[in-house]
Amino acid sequence: MSVYDPPVNNAVSGVTVRTLLSDPALSLNVQIVAGEQGLERIIDHPRVQKSGLALVGHLHGVVATRVQVLGETELSYVESLPVDGQIQAASHLFSCGLSCVLVSRGVSVPQALIDAANQKHTPLILAKEKSSLAITAVHVVLDELLAPRARLHGVLVDIFEVGVLLKGQSGIGKSECALELVMRGHRLVADDIVECDYRPPGMVFGEPARPLRHYMEVRGLGILNMKDLYGVTSVRERKRIDLVVDLELWAPNAEYDRIGVEDQHTRVLGVPIRTVRLPIQPGRNMSSIIEIAARAELLRRAGHHPAKEFIDRIEKSGHESIPPSRAAPPPSRTAPPRSRSPNESSAPPPAHSIQGLDLRKAETDRRS
């Protein structure tokens, strides 16, 4: 499956036309022109459809459960037809049992479309905005309402703008690591329960469950409100998941990645997210290691892969040979002394001082 295809599992089955129009995030000035009886019809696809060919009777590819949009071009075609042609075109369009039809630009709707919408109980909606703005606004709301969702057990922290999801068995220390990271200046997104939703193209966002927002449980301390303890800069309402850190107890016989060449991934809502396994052992500063993992993820996104660069350097050093023309000449017997930095603190004393000390020492030995 391509990351551009939304996962079919855990997807919302659909929303009603009434829910779409009443959503406060729908930034459109809309008016229901006809077909109010069909406001409970279901929309189950997050993308709209412009089926101008349906007006001429070509109904192949029309998805009834998508929002159908009629723009200025389609309306100008309908208005150019005689009255009988308008009625026939409206009959073709509304014969598909559509969820709703959205007319943009706030133009006057032909009476044939209004009559057909009332006859088929199909909501006919008029938006004052132009087609591009109306389509974008509908997409934004439907992406939120119809987004595939999943609930994960873990802790989500924003570290250097990298969304790090801490996973592991209960009581392993996920919340304690997150608390230390917050004390370092990073931001808590969710503790214990992470509500995940899919966003195209191939992104997964996480947010806390509403009752647990800003709260963290630390064994021995109980429930803590991180926003009250450390201020508004210590929490974040929502963050894309960029890295999964799987915490597990150290096992002497287990194999752990020592170089970091091969990437491991965890699929969340069908999206592969890079995963790092970190063994927990007494004496290991896990919060610092997790912070470094976030820094390393930033380097990877910038095109730097330390492990691969290291292996490439080793391989090149084993195969490279110095050309004869560039070989260093043999050292000269009268080579000048190496120049030293004036800031060098361990410079040896001048040669004449050493000779003077030797002469004085020899004179003292002779007298004795």
Image (spheres, helix red, strand yellow):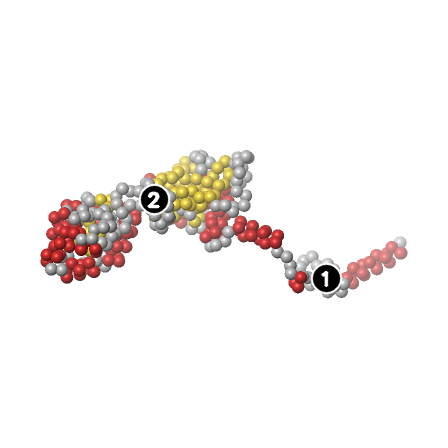
Residue 366 showing in the rendered view = yes
Query: Residue 91 or 136: which is nearer the viewer?
Result: 91
Front-lying residue, 332 or 250 = 332
Image quarter (top left, top right, bottom left or bottom right) of the C terminus: bottom right
Residue type at mark 2: give it: Pro
* Whether residue 33 can be seen here: no
Asked if marks 2 and 1 touch (Cβ < 8 Å), the reply is no
For the point 44% across and 50% down, the residue is 160
* Observer-nearest of 254 and 22: 254
In the image as oriented, which residue stretches furthest toward the left?
83
SS at badge 1: loop
Tell which circle, 2 or 1, labels the residue nearer the N-terminal end: 2
Q: Secondary structure at mark 2?
A: loop
Query: Callout 1: 10 Å neighbours few (<14), some, many (20+)?
Result: few
Report the residue at 50% width, 47% height from top.
Answer: 292
Q: Amino acid at mark 1?
A: Pro
Quickly name the residue at label 1: 330
Residue for point 29% across, 42% down: 12
Give me the disc on residue 41: none
Place residue 346 in its image quadrant. Answer: bottom right
Residue at numbered disc 2: 7
Viewed as shown, does residue 140 lie left or right of 57?
Answer: right
**Front residue of this view, candidates 205 and 357:** 205
Q: Residue at x 18, y 46 (%)?
A: 97
Establish if 53 lies above or below 16.
below
- Position of residue 263 measured from the top left corner of the image (x, y, whole percent): 48, 45
Residue 317 at x, y percent in the picture: 61, 53
Image x and y of residue 266, in percent: 42, 42
